[in-house]
Image: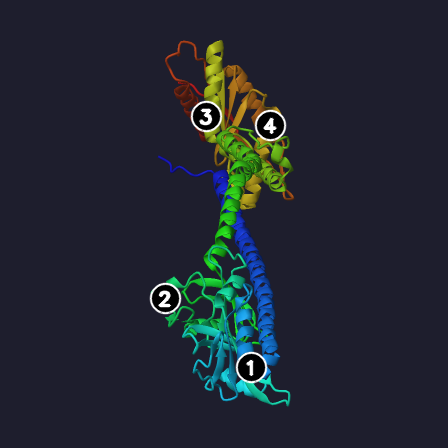
């Protein structure tokens, strides 16, 4: 059973489908990367905008707090150390609902706190604080997170020096910041479900309490030393690059991958950081990408693939038609005269390749027909004389015998040989001998009837079958032929000489021989005429003998 081969059109469709899908996948991949970068960059810009706006708000807020403490430090009551008025002033300021300070205090040049809110001389000394030393140098300051000596809480201290009328620094006024106020300001921005916005001091301590406080405490990624004492680990601090401005894709203090933007304040040693989990940012993009892929797949399945299949079939149709035509030609090639016809009317003939293929096949079929005709001629006829060879002569003789048998007529056969042909070859050469054989064939062509069949049976021996010819007619034909040969010289290669032939004649009338085959009767005719020819040879040649029993 022959192996079943796959159709080329199916292979073509499969490869086209593969490369189309590959091209589509590459295009989608490139578009996805480019779109994601744009999407990420746009989101980074949003975070950077929030960071910049929040930084500006916080700097303004800190400036307002410094200005507020500076105004208190320049009040008459403070400069004159009128503790009663100072207590009243502090109490009035702290009673305002809009105040951002949790407590106010006044300390002398030695750092002793003289007034703390409504308390006078609470026996607290702040001489070991950095902001105290800066105040003595005439500088206002916003401190880092400290444990308050007034109430033991973690707090942010805003300080300003008290300058007397003589221009000397006599002490300082401090205010502890209500950090919940900072958290309210930072919570103004809605940054998704996982967004965090917080302040960091120069030590990496979170000043504000983000929504994620409980998680890092539980997982040990921050050091909890108080309500507002969460210090980031060293890795997160390095990623945030405190003291610089920028944004990036990094691991947060929780270990999550986040998109974040950070910036240090211009006038204060604080940094603003805003972060969102990368998973939250990427999720909408993934959903849109998945939807786009489904749409593309739907378009491909419903439109592109059917179109691809249709045009692939249309493209292959001319090739399939040409293939079928070639197969049909191959099946009929054994029939005589079959020539491959160009499919000029087919839909694909306008294809250059098919046109070239058709022309080549047509030329090839013509050459094959020529070759077949030549081989057929060589198989039936003697190549030198053009007469029927022995096999074809015998077959034609059988046909003639069958014909005369139906008509009830005679059939004769003359068998002749060239006298002394070997001597001719020896004397003049084989080329001249061939010319003699050709001469004999030409003579037969001039005197034989159309119905007669002449053949060269081998060497210098020839035969002619004469349908519907009796003994008398055959003897007359043989005599006329013998006379023609002996009277006209052979002219070949500047040579001229005469030749003679010896002829044997045999005749048969198939009446009453219906049971005898035409093959046997043909064999008898040849044998009988050959015997008669040999008899003519024995009598000296150049004569005609009739076979007789």
Q: Quadrant of residue 128?
A: bottom left
Q: Earlier in the sequence, mark 1 or mark 4?
A: 1
Identify which residue is drawn at 50% across, 35% down.
Answer: 460
Quick one: 17 or 210, which is closer to the camera?
Answer: 210
Identify which residue is drawn at 45% across, 29% down.
Answer: 391
Residue carrying label 1: 82
Q: Depth-wise, is mark 2 or mark 4 nearer the camera?
A: 2
Q: Quadrant of residue 386?
A: top right
Q: Earlier in the sequence, mark 4 or mark 3?
A: 3
Q: Earlier in the sequence, mark 2 or mark 4?
A: 2
Residue carrying label 2: 217
Element at badge 2? helix
| Numbered mark located on residue 445 in the image | 4
Residue carrying label 3: 394
Mark pair 2, 4: CA separation: 125 Å
Disc 1 vs disc 3: Cβ atoms closer than 8 Å? no
Quick one: 160 or 259, which is closer to the camera?
Answer: 160
Element at badge 1? loop
Mark pair 3, 2: CA separation: 118 Å
Q: Depth-wise, is mark 1 or mark 2 nearer the camera?
A: 1
x and y, in percent, of residue 476 in the image = 56, 19
Viewed as shown, does residue 312 lie left or right of 211? right
Query: Crowding at label 3, few (<14), some or many (≥20) Cα neighbours within 10 Å?
Result: many
Q: Depth-wise, is mark 1 or mark 4 nearer the camera?
A: 1
x and y, in percent, of residue 467 in the image = 52, 17
Query: Crowding at label 4, few (<14), some or many (≥20) Cα neighbours within 10 Å?
Result: some
Element at badge 4? helix
Disc 3 vs disc 2: Cβ atoms closer than 8 Å? no
Q: Earlier in the sequence, mark 1 or mark 3?
A: 1
Q: Quadrant of the C terminus?
A: top left
Mark pair 4, 3: CA separation: 19 Å
x and y, in percent, of residue 278 in the image = 47, 59
């Amino acid at each position: 059973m022959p192996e079943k081969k796959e159709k080329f059109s199916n292979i073509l469709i499969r490869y086209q489908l593969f490369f189309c899908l590959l091209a589509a996948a590459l295009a989608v991949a490139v578009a996805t990367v480019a779109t994601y970068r744009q999407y990420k960059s746009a989101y980074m810009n949003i975070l950077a905008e929030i960071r910049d706006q929040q930084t500006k708000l916080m700097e303004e807020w800190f400036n307002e707090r410094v200005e507020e403490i500076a105004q208190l430090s320049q009040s008459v009551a403070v400069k004159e150390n009128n503790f009663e008025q100072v207590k009243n002033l502090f109490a009035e300021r702290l009673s305002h609902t809009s105040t951002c300070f949790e407590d106010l205090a006044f300390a002398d040049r030695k750092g002793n706190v003289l007034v703390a809110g409504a308390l006078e001389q609470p026996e607290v000394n702040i001489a070991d604080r950095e902001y105290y030393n800066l105040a003595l140098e005439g500088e206002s300051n916003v401190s880092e997170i400290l444990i308050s000596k007034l109430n033991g809480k973690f707090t942010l201290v805003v300080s300003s020096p008290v300058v007397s009328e003589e221009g000397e620094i006599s002490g300082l006024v401090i205010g502890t910041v209500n950090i919940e106020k900072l958290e309210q300001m930072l919570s103004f921005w809605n940054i998704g479900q996982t967004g965090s916005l917080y302040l960091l001091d120069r030590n990496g301590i979170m000043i504000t309490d983000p929504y994620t406080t409980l998680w890092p405490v539980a997982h040990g990624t921050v050091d909890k030393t108080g309500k507002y004492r969460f210090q980031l680990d060293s890795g997160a601090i390095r990623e945030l690059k405190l003291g610089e401005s920028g944004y990036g894709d990094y691991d947060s203090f929780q270990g999550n991958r986040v998109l974040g933007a950070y910036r240090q304040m211009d006038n204060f040693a604080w940094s603003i950081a805003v972060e969102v989990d990368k998973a939250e940012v990427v999720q909408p993009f993934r959903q849109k990408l998945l939807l786009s892929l489904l749409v593309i797949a739907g378009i491909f399945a419903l439109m592109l693939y059917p179109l691809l299949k249709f045009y692939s079939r249309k493209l292959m149709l001319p090739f399939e038609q040409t293939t079928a035509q070639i197969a049909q030609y191959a099946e009929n090639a054994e029939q005589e005269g079959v020539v491959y016809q160009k499919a000029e009317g087919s839909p694909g003939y306008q294809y250059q390749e098919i046109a070239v293929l058709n022309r080549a096949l047509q030329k090839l079929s013509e050459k094959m027909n020529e070759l077949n005709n030549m081989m057929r001629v060589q198989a039936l006829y003697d190549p030198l004389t053009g007469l029927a060879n022995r096999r074809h002569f015998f077959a034609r003789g059988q046909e003639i015998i069958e014909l005369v048998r139906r008509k009830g007529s005679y059939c004769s056969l003359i068998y002749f040989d060239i006298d002394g042909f070997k001597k001719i070859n020896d004397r003049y050469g084989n080329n001249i001998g061939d010319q003699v054989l050709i001469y004999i064939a030409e003579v037969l062509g001039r005197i034989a009837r159309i119905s007669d069949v002449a053949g060269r049976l081998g060497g210098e021996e020839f035969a002619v079958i004469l349908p519907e010819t009796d003994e008398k007619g055959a003897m007359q034909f043989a005599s006329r032929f013998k006379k023609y040969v002996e009277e006209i010289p052979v002219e070949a290669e500047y040579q001229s000489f005469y030749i003679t032939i010896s002829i044997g004649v045999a005749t048969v009338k198939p009446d009453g021989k219906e049971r005898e085959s035409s093959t046997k009767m043909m064999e008898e005719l040849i044998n009988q005429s050959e015997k008669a020819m040999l008899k003519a040879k024995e009598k000296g040649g150049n004569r005609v003998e009739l076979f007789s029993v």
